[in-house]
């Protein structure tokens, strides 16, 4: 924090006179003792005796600042500057108050004036850097801090300020070097350890971050921020009990630590302790009502609880506080889409490309993005897959609508879907992702097509009948299955890398318990998790093709041979829906946005029936319903 300089006086005592010098010293002692009224009276007495005494104005301004009277302080600094316009210290002090009042451009101008008078004024360089950070002119801020470090190469505070500016500019490696220099100068600089740890966590170097936080705790065992850093490192390493303990230590030291409460709430949410999480997350925003990230975290929890109006309000509050953070817009989009508010949802959904943790990388093409309004007749457009395989299967339904606009469509998809999409209506050329692309005029990611077509609930396009399955494929997979008994295809787990995998995936043993004994079970999954291998090996009656399923065309052919598909929220559900196969989809309490709320039939796939958890994490009730309906279905 920048503070006005009041200790050093502008002129030697002999120059101002012994009496005035003594009065100034007395006024300064009163100010330092916290006796503002007496210090104020003393300064005014000096000004009556010596109206040109700039140090009296300077000290009087500091007294007013300490009393929260920044506007009054400014009048005293300006009066002093009228007397001594060439005093760099006064320009600096005036700039500090202007910054505190939020008048950053005026503050910057004052710092520039101070440095024009005294180019080697280190405090002004540092303070100017802080103002530039506030203005988000980060490269200039870094340059200002670097000048301060060159002037004071052994000053820890200068390197600390530089590290903070570099971290804000996302220049992580340089920030690490700056913080390391701080620690080299001052081995017990706890804030440098803490900020170094935050930077390491941002870079994904969680082990190093943990070691750094432990060094901070070694320097200051009672520092709540150091324990908070340790808690976050443990959480990111998946060491949840250790993270829990460290969060408790941080909050025992500082119960009103809003950020720690919020992150502890995130941990408790991950542990399924939602009531405890809600208490901490709600308390965090009470303590820090201007904390955008805190509202974002609370919004996440409300979404998990399906308290969607509250979740939306949290994201809107986060956006109001920091409109430039795309993650808040992205989270808002997911709530809007889940609620069925597609028009606003698709627009907000475009923010996904700017979020740091979005699963797909934004494609950099020189050709323009097609937004649905531009005339593409006679041109070539590239439609490219993004996110998961299920997303691609769901949204290629828009391909023929793009072709109907008169464009030649090049479709790029990942290899497992290549054969599946060969018979897709409207595709002029199919390209495997990663291979060379032909010339094209426009491009559009697949999940931007609903926005381009202005899709609302009532205008969701019907799924086009694809793929075209070859007779030899159908016959080959048909021979693998027993004739006679009803055949139930199952898919019980999705991608391990999915953020909500633990919520949406099942253990194989749990799903097998509900399938009637007289049904043949057909595994539609290619990969099996370690926890399920033993169960599968103990059931030789289950048909499991495994790696024989070379791609989704094979999976589609196998899927077509069963009477019913039961799947969790994974790509198999989308594939079965595309085939028009009767499919029961098992959904967690807070589902992915595409499944909407409170409906059993989805407008995306007429053949799918949705079985939703009625309470958080409770699969037993869902499976009991499925068991009863299976008995009825195959009795």
Image: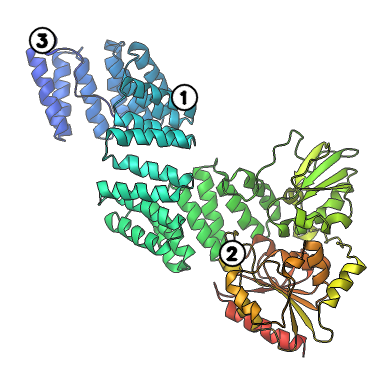
The answer to whether any part of residue 282 appears in the image is no
Quadrant for the N terminus, please: top left
Residue named by callout 3:
14
Sequence-wise, which precedes: disc 3 or disc 1? Answer: 3
Q: Residue at x 29, y 42 (%)?
A: 190
Residue named by callout 1:
140
From this view, report whether residue 120 is shown above or below residue 342: above
Sequence-wise, which precedes: disc 3 or disc 2? Answer: 3
Q: Position of residue 486 (x, y in %)?
A: 79, 84
Q: Circle 2 — which element? A: helix
From this view, report whether residue 326 is shown above or below residue 260: above
Q: Circle 1 — which element? A: helix
Q: Residue at x 67, y 64 (%)?
A: 596
From this view, report whether residue 4 is shown above or below residue 226: above
Q: Position of residue 95 (x, y in %)?
A: 35, 24
The answer to whether any part of residue 389 appears in the image is yes
Using a 10 Å C-alpha cutoff, classify the residue at mark 2 as few (fewer than 14 neighbours), some (14 to 19) or many (20 or more). some
Image quadrant assignment for residue 470: bottom right
Q: Nearer the viewer, residue 114 or 73?
A: 114
Q: Position of residue 25 (x, y in %)?
A: 11, 23
Q: Nearer the viewer, residue 300 or 190?
A: 190
Residue named by callout 2:
501
Q: Give the Cα separation between the discs numbered 2 and 1.
A: 44 Å
Q: Position of residue 365 (x, y in %)?
A: 73, 36
Q: Which numbered disc, 2 or 1, marks the residue closer to the eye?
A: 2
Q: Give the Cα separation between the discs numbered 3 and 2.
A: 77 Å
Q: Which numbered disc, 3 or 2, marks the residue closer to the eye?
A: 2
In this rendering, position of residue 127 left or right of residue 322:
left
Sequence-wise, which precedes: disc 2 or disc 1? Answer: 1
Q: Residue furthest top?
A: 15
């Amino acid at each position: 924090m920048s503070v006005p300089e009041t200790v050093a006086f502008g002129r030697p005592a002999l120059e101002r006179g012994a009496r005035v010098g003594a009065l100034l010293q007395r006024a300064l002692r009163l100010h330092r003792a916290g006796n503002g009224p007496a210090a104020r009276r003393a300064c005014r007495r000096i000004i009556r005796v010596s109206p040109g005494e700039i140090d009296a104005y300077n000290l009087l301004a500091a007294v007013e600042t300490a009393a929260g009277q920044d506007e009054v302080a400014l009048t005293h600094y300006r009066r002093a500057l009228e007397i001594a316009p060439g005093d760099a210290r006064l320009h600096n002090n005036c700039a500090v108050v202007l910054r505190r009042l939020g008048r950053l451009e005026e503050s910057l101008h004052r710092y520039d004036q101070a440095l024009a008078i005294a180019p080697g004024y280190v405090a002004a360089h540092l303070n100017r850097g802080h103002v530039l950070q506030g203005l988000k002119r980060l490269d200039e801020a870094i340059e200002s801090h670097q000048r301060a470090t060159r002037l004071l190469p052994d000053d820890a505070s200068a390197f600390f300020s530089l590290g903070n500016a570099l971290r804000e500019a996302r220049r992580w490696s340089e920030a690490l070097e700056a913080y390391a220099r701080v620690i080299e100068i001052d081995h017990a600089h706890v804030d440098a350890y803490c900020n170094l740890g935050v930077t390491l966590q941002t870079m994904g170097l969680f082990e190093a971050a943990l070691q750094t936080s432990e060094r901070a705790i070694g320097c200051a065992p009672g520092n709540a921020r150091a324990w908070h850093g340790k808690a976050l490192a443990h959480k990111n390493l998946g060491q949840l009990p250790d993270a829990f303990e460290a969060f408790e230590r941080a909050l025992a030291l500082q119960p009103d630590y809003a950020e720690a409460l919020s992150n502890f709430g995130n941990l408790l949410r991950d542990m399924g302790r939602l009531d405890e999480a809600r208490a901490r997350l709600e308390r965090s925003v009470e303590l820090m009502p201007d904390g955008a990230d805190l509202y974002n975290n609370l919004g996440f929890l409300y979404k998990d609880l399906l308290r969607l109006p509250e979740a939306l309000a949290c994201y809107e509050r986060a956006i109001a506080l920091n409109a430039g953070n795309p993650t808040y817009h992205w989270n808002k989009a997911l709530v809007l889409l889940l609620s069925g508010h597609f028009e606003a949802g698709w627009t907000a959904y475009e923010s996904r490309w700017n979020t740091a943790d979005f699963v797909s990388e934004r494609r950099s093409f020189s050709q323009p993005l097609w937004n649905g309004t531009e005339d593409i007749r006679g041109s070539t457009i590239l439609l490219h897959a993004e996110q998961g395989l299920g997303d691609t299967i769901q949204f290629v339904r828009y391909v023929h609508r793009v072709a109907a606009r008169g464009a030649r469509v090049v479709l790029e998809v990942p290899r497992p879907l290549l054969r599946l999409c060969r018979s897709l209506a409207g595709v002029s050329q199919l390209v495997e992702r990663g291979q060379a692309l032909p010339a094209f005029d426009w491009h559009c990611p697949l999940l931007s097509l609903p926005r381009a077509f202005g899709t609302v609930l009532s205008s969701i396009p019907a799924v086009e009948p694809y793929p075209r399955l070859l007779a030899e494929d159908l016959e080959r997979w048909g021979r693998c299955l027993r004739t006679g008994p009803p055949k139930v295809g199952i898919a019980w787990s999705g991608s391990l890398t999915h953020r909500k995998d633990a919520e949406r995936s099942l253990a194989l043993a749990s799903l097998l318990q509900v399938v009637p004994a007289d049904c043949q079970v057909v595994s539609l999954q290619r990969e099996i998790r370690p926890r399920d291998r033993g169960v599968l090996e103990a059931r030789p009656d289950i048909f499991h093709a495994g790696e024989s399923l070379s791609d989704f065309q094979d999976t589609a052919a196998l899927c077509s041979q069963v009477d019913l598909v039961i799947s969790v929220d994974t790509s198999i559900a989308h594939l079965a829906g595309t085939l028009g196969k009767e499919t029961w989809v098992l959904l967690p309490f807070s589902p992915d946005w595409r499944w909407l709320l409170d409906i059993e039939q989805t407008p995306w796939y007429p053949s799918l029936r949705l079985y939703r958890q009625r309470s958080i994490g409770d699969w037993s009730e869902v499976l009991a319903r499925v068991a009863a309906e299976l008995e009825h279905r195959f009795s």
